[in-house]
Image (cartoon, rainbow, N blue to C red):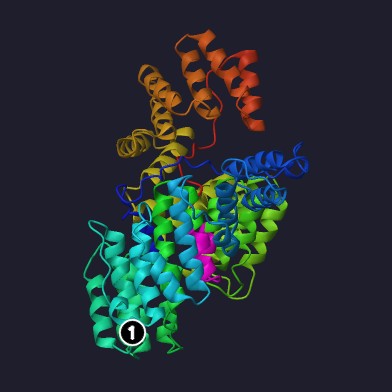
């Protein structure tokens, strides 16, 4: 995923603004789609059912409705365009190419996307000259110019037009085209038997610090194919120094060290698919979800086994509410793939979010226990165990990961286990892990907050803990959890006037947090503001509290506070449950 992370930083709003039409959101549920009151009644009814399905993100069902309307002999309004769009988003690119609007009239943005679809379909079917001609049409403009620029050399290469294939594509002020165009030319030159010229392009990419990590795997694979494996290992090591847990880089390094066969040079279709995935990633960063999904479907039409595209399709469908479609995309990642654990983890989280916790854990556990399961699979399983309050089981999964890193401990693993130990009731062991993690990363706000709050809530080492949470708040002043920790520190130290100001700020940021509401109620009570305190405790009961929080709030509503309020579990700042 290194390339995707770096690529997102290259997004250009000038290139990737929305199309002329407003895209309907990908949202909703599949429930009830086949019992539509319009089902089977009229062409217009089928059109309305298709429109509803399309807006709900159910593109495959929308395509079926639109086709049914066409079969009934009517073509109301935008039916043709909607049928094309639905087929494309559903992944039926060949059908979409047949339905692509060609006549004048209608929506210009849809016509342009149709032209691109027909061109890509032609390339996929081996009609390279047709694809080349379609891509050269000046009508195929905004917002597809980057894709056109990057696809043109690959179409030319497939058509035997050597001069155009080896010409570096250009698009004014577009870094996406600049960098991926150079990668494409390097691959085309290598395919043409010109390794020295290809390497010049690879090296030019390596000289750009911001994109060097993005293309290191491509240049490293080139070096491996040239049997310069030691140079490839050195390149991988230089990137791993900044991203030590990147699975793809670790796999590439292991392959080069073992002198295994290098990756094959990409085919023409794979190179074209790579250009479309790059464009899709930037559309994603610009929240243009339908363009992103359309481009990914086009990429998969050229390269059906493209794993990063499958993961991205799954993510978009999941975000749009098509959970079944998302799982189907993730499930296409085969066992043995470096991305298998990530795909299974995503499936597990869709199950967790749908409330099927046992099945989610079963999927994650199976992935973690699969042959050659790596660290990422173990981490997904541990995170799901923690999400289901199985803290002791999570510790058991994390223990061997920390043991494997004992010569170079990872503060994030120590933090993860420390939280799990604390929640499992093993505070001395948790404290040891948290202190070791903080020693490794003394400026991490979440660590400072978690350990500091733990001491504050136990009335231990209060001056030191106060200093820690002050540092955390300074680094992240908009964190309600951290402001809560600081307010609670002042409360423990007897300064309720300072405490109430901070807790009121915290509750403005996170009004739905039961702990912050409870803390503010306690401080109001100490300040003699008992009516306000009771309001806050009643508020706790309305916020889906844990059994412990509910019992504590009910007790205080009945009897108020004694000389000392009940202890709380440490507040968890944003992201503390995720490694």
Rendered location of residue 98, percent (x, y) = 57, 61
The residue nearer to you, when weighing 547 against 319, is 319
Q: Residue at x 44, y 84 (%)?
A: 264
Rendered location of residue 317, percent (x, y) = 57, 51
Q: Determine which residue is flagged by label 1.
A: 190
Q: Quadrant of residue 238?
A: bottom left
Residue 500 appears left or right of 558: left
Q: Residue at x 51, y 58 (%)?
A: 312
Task: Give the vertical position of 448 relative to 92 (above or below).
Answer: above
Dominant secondary structure (helix, strand or loop) of the stretch shown in magenta: helix
Taking the magenta stretch, the answer to whether it contains residue 303 is: yes
Rendered location of residue 20, percent (x, y) = 41, 43
The residue nearer to you, when weighing 90 against 329, is 90
Q: Which residues are magenta?
A: 295-312
Taking the magenta stretch, the answer to whether it contains residue 214 is: no
Callout 1: 10 Å neighbours few (<14), some, many (20+)?
some
Answer whether residue 571 is visible to the viewer in this image.
yes
Rendered location of residue 531, percent (x, y) = 54, 8
Question: What is the tally of numbered marks visible in this picture?
Answer: 1
Task: Give the vertical position of 222 relative to 125 (above or below).
Answer: below
Task: Give the vertical position of 210 relative to 552 (above or below).
Answer: below
Q: Quadrant of the N terminus?
A: bottom left
Q: Residue at x 47, y 66 (%)?
A: 120
- Report helix, strand or loop for mark 1: helix
Answer whether residue 397 is visible to the viewer in this image.
no
Q: Residue at x 76, y 42 (%)?
A: 39
The residue nearer to you, when weighing 101 against 372, is 101
């Amino acid at each position: 995923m290194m390339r995707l992370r770096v690529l997102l930083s290259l997004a250009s709003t000038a290139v990737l603004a929305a199309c002329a039409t407003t895209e309907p959101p990908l949202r909703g549920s599949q429930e009830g789609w086949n019992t539509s009151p319009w089902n089977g009644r009229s062409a217009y009814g089928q059109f309305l059912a298709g429109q509803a399905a399309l807006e709900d993100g159910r593109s495959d069902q929308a395509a079926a409705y639109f086709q049914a309307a066409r079969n009934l002999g009517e073509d109301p309004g935008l039916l043709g365009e909607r049928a094309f769009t639905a087929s494309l988003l559903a992944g039926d690119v060949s059908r979409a190419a047949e339905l692509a609007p060609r006549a004048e009239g209608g929506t210009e943005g849809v016509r342009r996307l149709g032209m691109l679809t027909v061109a890509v379909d032609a390339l996929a079917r081996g009609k390279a000259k047709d694809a080349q001609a379609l891509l050269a049409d000046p009508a195929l403009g905004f917002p597809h110019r980057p894709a056109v620029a990057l696809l043109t050399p690959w179409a030319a290469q497939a058509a035997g037009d050597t001069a155009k294939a080896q010409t570096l594509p250009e698009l004014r002020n577009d870094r996406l085209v600049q960098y991926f165009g150079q990668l494409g030319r390097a691959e085309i030159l290598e395919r043409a038997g010109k390794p020295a010229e290809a390497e010049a392009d690879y090296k030019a990419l390596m000289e750009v610090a911001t994109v060097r990590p993005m293309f290191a795997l491509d240049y490293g694979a080139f070096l491996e194919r040239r049997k310069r494996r030691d140079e490839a290992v050195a390149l991988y090591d230089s990137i791993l120094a900044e991203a030590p847990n990147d699975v793809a880089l670790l796999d590439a390094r292991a392959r080069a060290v073992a002198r295994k066969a290098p990756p094959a040079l990409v085919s023409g279709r794979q190179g074209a698919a790579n250009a479309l995935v790059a464009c899709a990633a930037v559309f994603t960063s610009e929240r243009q979800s339908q363009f992103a999904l359309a481009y990914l479907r086009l990429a998969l039409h050229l390269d059906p086994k493209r794993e990063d595209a499958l993961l991205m399709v799954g993510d978009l469908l999941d975000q749009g509410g098509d959970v079944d479609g998302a799982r189907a995309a993730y499930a296409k990642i085969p066992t043995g793939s470096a991305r298998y654990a990530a795909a299974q983890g995503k499936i597990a989280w869709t199950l967790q979010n749908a409330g099927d916790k046992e099945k989610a854990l079963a999927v994650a556990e199976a992935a973690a226990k699969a042959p050659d399961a790596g660290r990422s699979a173990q981490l997904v399983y541990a995170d799901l165990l923690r999400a289901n309050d199985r803290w002791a089981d999570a510790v058991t999964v994390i223990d061997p990961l920390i043991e494997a890193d004992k010569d170079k401990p990872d503060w994030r693993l120590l933090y993860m286990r420390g939280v799990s130990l604390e929640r499992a009731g093993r505070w001395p062991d948790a404290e040891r892990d948290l202190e070791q993690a903080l020693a490794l990363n003394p400026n991490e706000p979440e660590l400072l907050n978690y350990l500091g709050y733990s001491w504050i809530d136990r009335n231990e080492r209060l001056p030191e803990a106060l200093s820690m949470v002050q540092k955390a708040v300074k680094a992240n002043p908009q964190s309600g959890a951290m402001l809560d920790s600081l307010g609670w520190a002042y409360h423990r130290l007897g300064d309720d006037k300072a405490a109430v100001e901070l807790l009121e700020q915290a509750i403005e940021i996170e009004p739905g947090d039961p702990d912050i509401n409870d803390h503010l109620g306690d401080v109001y009570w100490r300040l003699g503001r008992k009516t306000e305190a009771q309001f806050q405790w009643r508020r706790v009961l309305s916020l889906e509290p844990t059994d412990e929080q509910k019992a504590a709030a009910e007790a205080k509503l009945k009897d108020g506070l004694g000389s000392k309020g009940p202890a709380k579990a440490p507040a968890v700042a944003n992201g503390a449950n995720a490694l």
